[in-house]
Amino acid sequence: MNESEKDASLKELIQKPTHAIYRWLGDRIFMTVVVLLGSAIIMLAFGMAWVLYGEGSQALREFGFFQFLSGRTWDPAVQLQFGTWPFLFGTLVTSIIALAISLFPAIAVAVVSAEYAPKWLSNIIDNLVQLIAAVPSVVIGIWGIFVLAPWMRDAVYMPIFMWADVNDPGLLPILGSPIGYGMTTATIVLSLMIIPYTTALTKDAIESVPKEQREAARALGATRWEVIRMAVLPYARGGILAGAILSLGRAIGETMAVAMLIGNKNTLPFSIFGAGATMPSVIVNEFREAVESLHLSSLMLIGFYLFILALVVNLAAAYITRKYSITAGKVV
Amino acid sequence: MKTLRYRNIRDKVMESIIIISTVLVLLPLIIIIVHVVVHGISAINWEFFTEELGSPSRAIQGRPTGLVHTILGTVVVDFMALALAVPIGIGAGIMLSEYPDHVLNPTLRIMNDTLNGMPAILKGLFAFVLIVKPMGTFSGFAGAVALAFVMIPIIARTTESALMSIPWSLREAGLAIGLPRWRVVLSTVMPAAKTGLVTGILIGFARAAGEAAPLLFTSFGNNYLPNNWLGFIFEPVDTLPQRLYSLAISPYSEWHSMGWAAAIVLLLFVIVCFVGARLLTRKKFQTN
């Protein structure tokens, strides 16, 4: 487009009498479409809860809300008795321990990236940490099945098991059978997978700590660690807390890697090395083979409980971000 | 009173602990990638891209098998999901950023975050009830719907922040020369935010492409190529993450190595999307 054409089109654009229909109706239609698309998301979220509740209602009527929650039997074959306690327990134990394992390293990565590393290195670290979140969980799962679990069995579980066998046989039922696939393996993999979320929010929070805060601490003669410990981390606690809760939410919902590594045992008691199950893993394992409608409905009801759990965790994270964060409610 | 010597030693000790933790976090990632690449490259061959999987006996007898149907199925399902998710995600993003006073916005924001935080497996159950049950069969379309549920909240959120980063004066300039509001959004704000929009779509796409859980109940999986192209939409379809899961938990060692090959293809695909998104963001910041 040459200059004169550009001028002409500009002039046309300015002088063209834009019709009221074009303006008024166009705006109305555009806004309606946009609002409809936005409302679709609201309806999706409500619809999901509604559908899971509706599909699970048969099991809900059969067992009752709290009996299903605390029921310890999951028997789809003979008694058709369903209770979700083993899975709820497995979910809570794996995700809370995974969070406990990952919290310090996750904060450490954020501190290194924000405080210690030079710019280029901190870029590399950030990208690698985000890459952990990007690697599909089935890929981590296949690595866990063929590399991590056999290695853990030979290098960690077996020696401990053998030691316990000789010295204190009373420990054996607590340790469980060291097949490699079980609660511990799943928890270790989980703790790796949830690190990026804590790290991202912690780094955001650390970076928004005012420079004066650091300078004041340095001026008082604080060492580098003391600056971080006394001036930076307390200021960033909102971000750390929100990130930790978000990580917990991811751990609760993490499905494939856990289902591939946890060993899938539906009955309590779980043992440290032995197989277990979580709410998502039991859905993955049994949904495709469920024939009884009560079985299907029970799985849907587990989905509904999982929905509530994830909802509570997410709302808590959102609340904390809004309340404590200096970034005023901005999440990753 | 703590001596200076003690404090300096503590400083060094904490520094080393923190740096060692960082290495411990990043080391597993590198180990995983190295394992996937080593196992994957030794398992991948030409037949992997040209043959269909067939029954396990085919692999055990050493006849050529591959995952061509899986790769095609993944492409079809993922892009169908993208086509479903982009209008809704972008629309919601526009609503949040361009109509900031709309009464539904606070609800929308909370619901979008809720949807984003929901485990993908629940989105699979939802799509199962919405699509698979009425249709009476597992289908590629149902898989696409489930993956769209994964993409939508990500696209909505990134669209919102991409549009928000465009200065308000640009909109005012558009309005001042007499453009109606919808033209301002479509012809000035969105082109200006193009990079951010594409980045968001790439991130959502990469995230959804790696999801296996929702596909198990929706597109289900299939060992063979469908008879015609419509089969990718209306019949059970194989997709990479879900096939990778089935191969990994199968009892056949031939299938295990094929699982590694699937893993390297999937990982490569996700990393390409990831790097693409990173490069786009970097370019955006440089021009600003």
Image: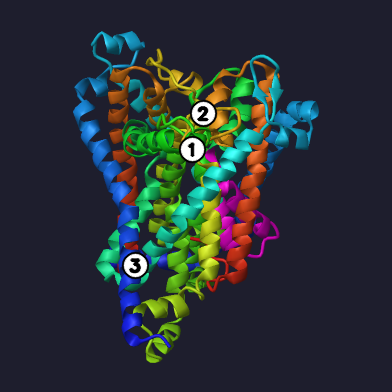
Q: Earlier in the sequence, mark 2 or mark 3?
A: 3
| Residue A34 visible (yes or no) | no
Res B208 label: none
Q: Nearer the viewer, residue B34 or B155?
A: B34
Location of residue A67 in the rendering, given as x and y in whole percent from the top left corner: 76, 33
What range of the chain is rendered magenta? B92-120
The residue positioned 34% from the left and 65% from the top of the image is B17
Location of residue B71 in the rendering, given as x and y in whole percent from the top left corner: 34, 27
Within-10-Å neighbours for mark 2: few <14, some 14–19, many 20+: many
Which residue was labeled with disc 2? Answer: A264
As helix, strand or loop, the secondary structure at mark 2 comes to loop
Answer whether residue B113 is magenta in the image: yes
Q: Quarter holding the N terminus of chain A?
A: bottom left
In this rendering, the answer to whether A239 lies above or below A301 is below
Which residue was labeled with disc 3? Answer: A112
Q: Chain of mark 1?
A: A
Q: Which amino acid does the dot numbered 2 rest on? A: Asn
Q: Earlier in the sequence, mark 1 or mark 3?
A: 3
Query: In the displayed image of the protein, which residue is found farthest to the front?
Result: A167
Q: CA distance from mark 1 to mark 2?
A: 9 Å
The main secondary structure of the magenta stretch is helix
Q: CA distance from mark 1 to mark 3?
A: 31 Å
